[in-house]
Amino acid sequence: MKPMVRSLTALLLAWVLMPAVSAAPGHKPVTPVQVTAERVTYVSQEDFDTVKTLIAEALTGRGLVVNNVAHIGDMLERTGKDLGTTRQVYLKAEGIEFCSATVSRKMMEADPHHIVFCPYVIAIYVLPQAPQQTYVSFRRPAASGSRAVRESLREVERLLHTIVEEALR
């Protein structure tokens, strides 16, 4: 029963938390292909480099700065050889790390232990079995605790949804 309750709760939260996407001329509605308690995943038919550029533009358009780009796919490829595995997990995979002073401050003022959620990471990746699709995912901060804490974490998730949805329209 617990997994079912968790799944239903995750779906309800996704429905409540997802910002409305305008259907303005030239903009297509964008919705996640998967929402779990831990992460949200979107998919695009654009190539990896285009999606990465669009995410970066959505960040800088909000005055946010990319702290780091983690080359996750390259690391797995390099270390796989040392570990004796030949399975290719990703064709390309990177994590874009950034922070928002405003949203992060609210989150950490509500609970200083939520420092672990910062920086935020938006992962962009292409799977070998679906080379024509680019996936975009982010972790969902678990909205628990006091009302102020829950609201601050919902604001983080709204920011992540908004950035990804703007980029993928």
Image: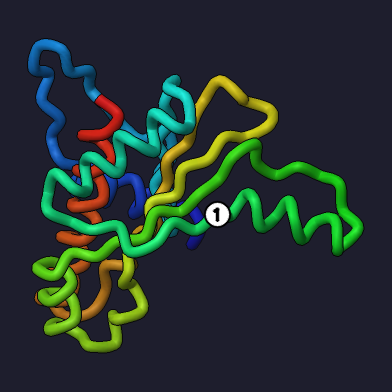
Determine which quarter of the picture holds residue 81: bottom right
**Residue 14, percent from left and from top:** 28, 46
Residue located 68% across and 28% down the image: 129
Mark 1 Cα within 10 Å, few/some/many (few <14, many 20+)? Answer: few
Where is residue 27 drawn, in percent x and y?
A: 17, 18
Is 146 rendered above or below residue 154?
below
Whether residue 85 is situated above or below residue 45 in the rendered picture: below
Residue placed most toward the observer, 103 or 34: 103
Write the residue at 75% across / 56% down: 78
Residue 118 horizontal side relative to residue 29, left or right: right
In the picture as drawn, the residue positioned furthest to the bottom comes out as 112
Does residue 25 appear left or right of residue 140 in this picture? left
Residue ranking furthest to the top? 25
- Callout 1 amino acid: His
- The residue wearing badge 1 is 71
Residue at the image position 19 percent from the left and 52 percent from the top? 159
